[in-house]
Image: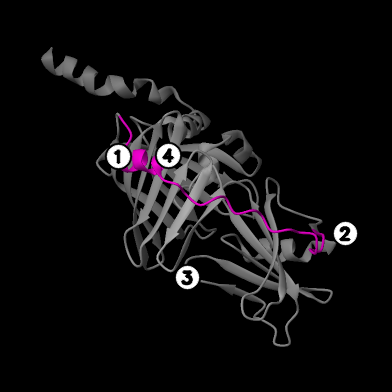
C-alpha cells in the first residue's frame, strides 16, 4: 500500500500534463515566458562553436525586467526594463532599442501569439526526456512547406519553461541548439534586476529617416513570413547606401540587403557550417543579398521577388 501511495504522489503532478495537446504545451510556455521569474544557465551550440550564457527574468514594480550575460569572450550584456532593451558591449557606448524581449536566447515568437506560428508549422507532440535534471516534454515544429526548416523544443513539465530548442535541416542535421544546463525558478526578482530598474539607461535610438530610401517590395513571400524591419543607411568606410529588410515567420529569420551592384560580384550562393545560407541576385542595377537559416531555394525566390514600387 505504501508503494502504491508513493507511486500516486510521483505520477499525479504530471497527470494533467498528459492531457495537453501540442499547442496547449506551447501556449503554457508562452505564458510562462511572460510571467515566470527564473534564472537559466544556457549553452548555445552552432557547429563546433559553444556559447555559454546566463539569463535572468523577473518582475519589479509591475515591470518585466530581464538580464542576459555572455560568459565567454569580451564582456557583452543586455538589460530589458519594460519595453526597452539596452546593450552593453566593451568596445562601444551603451545603446537602447524599443523591444519587448532580449533577442539571442529563445525565438521571440515563443513568448507571443502561438497561433501565428500555425501558418508555417504543424505542432506535434514528441517523447519525454530529462534535461538539466528536469523531465521535459518535446514538441515538434513540422514545416508545412519546403521553404523553412523543422524545429523541436523541450518544455519543463513543472514550469513549462523551455529547456532545449533545436533547428534541424531537411537532412535531419542539427543546425543550432540552445539548451538549459540549470534552471532555477525564483520566488522574488534577483537583486541585479532590481538594480536595473534604478539605473538611468540611454534613450531609445530613433529609427533612421527613410525619406531617401527606395520603395523595395516583395512580390512573393512564403506563408507566414512578414516584414518586421525596414531600414536604410550607408555602409561604414565606403558610404554606399544600403537598404535593409528583416523577415520572420516567428522561428526562421531572413535578412535582405539591397545596394548598388559592385564591380566585383559576390559568390551567387554560400552555406556556412552552422546552416546559415546566403544568395546574391542581380535586380536591375542593384545587388540583392539574402541571408538566413532556411533552404537556399527560399532565399533565391525571395531575392528574385524584390521589385521597386
Give the distance between the C-alpha atoms of the residues marked 2 and 1, in whole angstroms: 52 Å
Is 274 or 233 nearer to us in this picture? 233
- Relative placement, left or right, of 20 versus 300 is left
Farthest residue in the left direction?
A: 2
Mark 4 or mark 1: whose residue is earlier in sequence: 4
Q: Is the residue under label 4 in contact with that under label 2 (CB below 8 Å)?
A: no
Element on which disc 3 rests: loop
The residue wearing badge 1 is 191
Give the distance between the C-alpha atoms of the residues marked 4 and 3, in whole angstroms: 35 Å
The residue wearing badge 3 is 273
Q: Residue at x 67, y 61 (%)?
A: 298
Is 268 or 84 nearer to us in this picture? 84
Q: Is residue 1 above or below residue 236?
A: above
Q: Which image quadrant is residue 117 in?
A: top right
Residue bounds of the magenta highlight: 188-216
- Relative placement, left or right, of 155 versus 134 is right
- Please name the predominant secondary structure of the magenta segment in the image: loop
Decide: few, some or many residues near mark 3? Use Cα within 10 Å; few <14, some 14-19, many ≥20: few
**Percent x, y for residue 241?**
73, 72
Q: Residue at x 51, y 60 (%)?
A: 171
Mark 2 or mark 4: whose residue is earlier in sequence: 4
- Relative placement, left or right, of 24 versus 220 is left
| Mark number displayed over residue 65 | 4
The residue wearing badge 2 is 309
Amino acid at each position: 500500500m505504501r508503494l502504491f501511495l508513493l507511486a500516486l504522489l510521483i505520477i499525479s503532478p504530471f497527470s494533467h500534463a498528459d492531457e495537453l495537446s501540442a499547442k496547449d504545451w506551447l501556449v503554457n510556455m508562452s505564458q510562462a515566458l511572460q510571467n515566470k521569474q527564473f534564472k537559466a544557465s544556457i549553452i548555445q551550440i552552432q557547429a563546433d562553436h559553444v556559447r555559454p550564457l546566463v539569463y535572468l527574468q523577473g518582475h519589479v514594480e509591475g515591470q518585466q525586467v530581464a538580464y542576459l550575460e555572455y560568459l565567454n569572450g569580451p564582456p557583452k550584456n543586455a538589460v530589458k526594463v519594460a519595453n526597452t532593451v539596452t546593450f552593453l558591449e566593451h568596445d562601444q557606448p551603451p545603446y537602447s532599442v524599443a523591444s519587448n524581449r532580449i533577442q539571442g536566447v529563445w525565438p521571440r515568437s515563443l513568448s507571443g501569439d502561438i497561433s501565428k506560428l500555425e501558418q508555417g508549422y504543424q505542432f506535434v507532440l514528441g517523447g519525454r526526456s530529462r534535461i538539466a535534471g528536469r523531465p521535459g516534454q518535446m514538441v515538434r515544429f513540422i514545416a508545412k512547406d519546403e521553404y523553412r526548416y523543422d524545429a523541436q523544443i523541450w518544455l519543463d513539465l513543472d514550469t513549462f519553461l523551455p529547456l532545449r530548442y533545436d533547428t534541424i535541416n531537411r537532412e535531419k542535421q542539427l543546425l543550432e541548439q540552445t539548451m538549459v544546463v540549470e534552471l532555477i525558478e525564483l520566488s522574488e526578482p534577483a537583486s541585479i534586476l532590481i538594480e536595473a530598474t534604478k539605473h538611468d539607461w540611454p534613450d531609445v535610438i530613433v529609427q533612421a529617416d527613410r525619406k531617401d530610401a527606395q520603395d523595395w517590395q516583395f512580390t512573393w513571400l512564403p506563408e507566414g513570413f512578414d516584414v518586421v524591419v525596414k531600414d536604410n543607411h550607408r555602409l561604414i568606410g565606403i558610404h554606399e547606401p544600403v537598404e535593409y529588410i528583416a523577415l520572420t515567420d516567428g522561428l526562421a529569420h531572413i535578412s535582405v540587403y539591397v545596394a548598388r551592384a559592385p564591380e566585383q560580384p559576390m559568390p551567387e550562393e554560400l552555406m556556412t557550417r552552422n546552416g546559415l545560407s546566403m544568395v546574391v541576385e542581380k535586380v536591375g542595377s542593384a545587388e540583392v543579398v539574402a541571408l538566413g537559416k532556411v533552404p537556399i531555394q527560399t532565399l533565391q525566390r525571395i531575392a528574385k521577388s524584390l521589385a521597386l514600387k
